[in-house]
Amino acid sequence: MAAAGGSPSIVEYFGGEDGYRCGYCKNETGNLSHGMWAHSMTVQDYQDLIDRGWRRSGKYVYKPIMNQTCCPQYTIRCQALHFQTSKSHKKVLKKMLKFLSKGDVPKVVSEEEPMDSHIEDAGTCDFAYKGESHVSQSELTPLGVDHTERAEDEDQDTGEKKEEGNVQKVESDSLRLHADKETPVPGEPSHSAKVHAPPKPGRKGADLSKPPCRKAKDIRKERKLQKLLQNQTCTVEGSQLQAADQVFLLQNSKSKTNQPKTIEDFVFVSLPDDAQHKLEVRVVRSSPPSSQFKATFQESYQVYKRYQMVVHKDPPDKPTINQFTRFLCDSPLEAENAPNGPECGYGSFHQQYWLDGKIIAVGVIDILPYCVSSVYLYYDPDYSFLSLGVYSALREIAFTRQLHEKAPDLCFYYMGFYIHSCPKMRYKGQYRPSDLLCPETYIWMPIEQCLPLLEHSKYCRFNQDGKAVDEGRIKELGRVRVLHKRTVMPYSVYKKRRKGPSDEASVQQYASLVGQTCSERMLLFRS
């Protein structure tokens, strides 16, 4: 679902010459990656990039140099629709239920899994600062498209003189994101959006959320489920998120009586009337910032500051508002809405966990065409006994399944990177079934097949078919799209106009890393 008629992605490629400090093995220069600054990016382009091993930190998008970096980082995804809760996951879910219903606080905090489920990104902001772009916004606004790309042929120089005058002016309005035309402000709830209220108990007549011919036992169970919104609510931009959908998920979570409990059985369970606490999960758009995001910005930042100081031992002056904004609020992703997409749209969001009216945790997520991608989690250290790193990951898997009901293509939960060489980071492999991305052919392999290989070598090609190649590799460098002097053109045209030394090696490297499809859709900024 590319942004037809919307703004194209615009990136500045920085290469990857310098090594940075590794947050895992503490090597001062061992962390090697390629990077680019994304001035804007469509959700489809970012989906395709993370499926080639890229990942974002704020607006900085980076790809580890897998066969050289000290601690190789493999993209990992969980098959959310088939996810099975482990014993330790159930413990965490039960612990939260006991706390909400009875106020029970465990005497000993479990050390089974790290509290911070996304610890690897804690250090990425360091190189994000170094790689920030200084190009002015005016230089990034395309005014024209050089249509010589239609007849491009690097070997034919005929018509070269015509090229200079073949730039057509394009109305700048047509380059704006299509969502601006008829849809509401990105991030604000649409007035026409259907919000399902819970069906009233006992009411007769057609209710599409209910299957026909149901037993009395099922009806009693559903009546009990109507309470689910009282104590464990999930809202998107201030509106109740499809109570009927939550009931539907619960009804379908166990097709047979004796099947193991799912996340939904724990998360959307009805709490007693005298429950000690109320938990509400709100999904607010962070970029562009919605009114709800702006209203809770300060409170959210204070939680982040305490988290960084207590958990990551940052000095009080380090977790600044500027760092928080650039690292966890700024995003290159354009807000997009599609008829067959989730009601909240695609893009970057904060999933806020509100306990008794105050924020105790925030999951930073991207909602993309095929997945929910987890960016970071921070929480109030006073509630570390609730294992919020694990709990939030489970809630994000449940959220992915919920979005799948409206957006059938969206069925994976991306957990960032799996680092086998760092034992503390292996816990991500416990969310099964999951796959790791082959760093050479970019196909997904079941993690069970990858782990034996990683025991022998920290860098591995997972695809055992020796003849297999990267199907998305760059085949025609001349077709790479370039933005030069506010004009969009293929690289074959730009190369002929360029003054000074050749930049072909850098463009070749960029194109090989992003792949042919993205290189032909995204605009590579050239000064």
Image (cartoon, grey):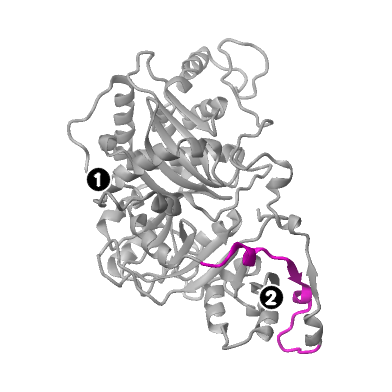
Considering depth in this image, is 234 or 501 the residue closer to the camera?
Answer: 501
Q: Residue at x 44, y 46 (%)?
A: 364
Q: Is residue 311 left or right of residue 411?
A: left
Q: Is residue 330 visible?
A: yes
Camera-nearest residue between 257 and 22 = 22
Taking the magenta stretch, the answer to whether it contains residue 137 is yes
**What is the magenta range?**
134-158
Residue 396 x, y percent position in the rendering: 44, 41
Task: Return the mark for residue 310.
Answer: 1
Task: Give the residue type at disc 1.
Answer: Val
Residue at 44 percent of width and 27 percent of height: 268
Residue in the image at 53% along x and 74% along y: 510
Numbered circle sitting on residue 490: 2
Picture layout, residue 48 above or below residue 388: below
Amino acid at pointer 2? Pro
Would residue 383 be found to the left or right of residue 287 on screen? left
Under tag 2, what secondary structure? strand
Q: Is residue 251 left or right of residue 179?
A: left
